[in-house]
């Protein structure tokens, strides 16, 4: 198995609480190399976020990035509704997440470790995350919309939680079916139709 292969649901590492990165690891080769591997795996997938346990490493490191090409299929209205906008690569070590606005926003969400499927998942509207970058420089990011969803999803991975633990399970579907039947409809309509 190439070291950047993504670990799938069923593997115990996805259910463990990931370990804190020690101060002496910051800026050192093994951590920098882990981050490079994670970024490469995320971009290859392609995905908008990845947590270290997803490449089999039980450490508290996440990477996130959203690019124009990944949202090319969304209409301006859909982007607006999701709060989706491109943002440059973020590497966050030992992230501590606070939900600033817990009013739930519900959208379809998937995970590279649960390939081919998606489901509606309620998430907090606005979050703040604090941590450091891979060299130890402190960072803090307060954000709403899609990046807030990605952050909640990735930090969940570090606690051994997958989106399937939080999803409205009646909405789970294969991506093709979800795209064919449910994409583009208001979430309230989808929920009513699926009784979710
Ligand atoms: Zn995931």
Image (spheres, grey):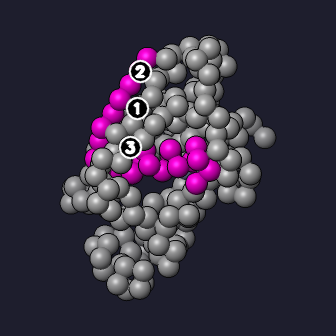
User: Tag 3, which secondary structure?
Assistant: strand
Circle 3 packing at 10 Å, graded few (<14), some (14-19), many (20+), is some
First to last magenta residue range:
137-161
Q: 10 or 166: which is nearer to us?
A: 166
How far apart marks 2 and 3 lie (CA) works out to: 16 Å
Contact, CB < 8 Å: mark 2 with mark 3? no
**Residue 130: which numbered mark, if any?**
1
Q: Which residue is drawn at 62% across and 17% down?
A: 25
In this figure, which residue is indicated by the disc labeled 3? Answer: 98
User: Which quarter shows the N terminus?
Assistant: top right
Mark 3 within 8 Å of ligand 1, using the beta carbon: no
Q: Is mark 1 on a helix, strand or loop?
A: strand
The verdict on label 1 being within 8 Å of ligand 1 is no
Please tell me whether residue 187 is drawn above or below residue 4 in the rendered image.
below
Q: Is residue 116 visible?
A: yes
Image disc number at residue 138: 2
Which of discs 2 and 3 lies nearer the camera? The answer is: 3
Quick one: label 2 or label 3, which is nearer the N terminus? 3
**Residue 30: x percent and y percent?**
67, 19
For the residues bearing labels 2 and 1, Cβ distance under 8 angstroms: yes
Q: Is residue 151 magenta?
A: yes
Q: Marks 1/3: CA distance?
A: 9 Å
Residue in the image at 32% along x and 56% along y: 102
Q: Is residue 182 found left or right of 85 in the rendered image?
A: right
């Amino acid at each position: 198995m190439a070291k950047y292969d993504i670990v799938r649901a069923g593997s115990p590492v996805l259910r463990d609480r990931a370990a804190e990165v020690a101060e002496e690891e910051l800026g050192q080769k093994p951590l920098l190399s882990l981050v490079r591997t994670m970024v490469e795996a995320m971009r290859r997938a392609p995905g908008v976020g990845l947590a270290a346990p997803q490449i089999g490493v039980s450490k508290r490191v996440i990477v996130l990035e959203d690019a124009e090409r990944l949202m090319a299929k969304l209409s301006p209205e859909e982007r607006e509704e999701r709060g989706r906008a491109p943002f440059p690569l973020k590497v966050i070590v030992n992230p501590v997440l606070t939900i600033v606005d817990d009013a739930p926003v519900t959208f379809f969400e998937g995970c590279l470790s649960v390939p081919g499927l998606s489901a509606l998942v309620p998430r907090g509207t606005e979050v703040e995350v604090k941590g450091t970058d891979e060299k130890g420089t402190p960072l803090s990011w307060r954000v709403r919309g899609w990046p807030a969803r990605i952050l909640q999803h990735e930090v969940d991975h570090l606690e051994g939680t997958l989106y399937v633990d939080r999803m409205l399970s009646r909405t789970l579907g294969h991506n093709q079916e979800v795209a064919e039947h449910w994409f583009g409809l208001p979430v309230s309509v989808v929920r009513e139709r699926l009784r979710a």
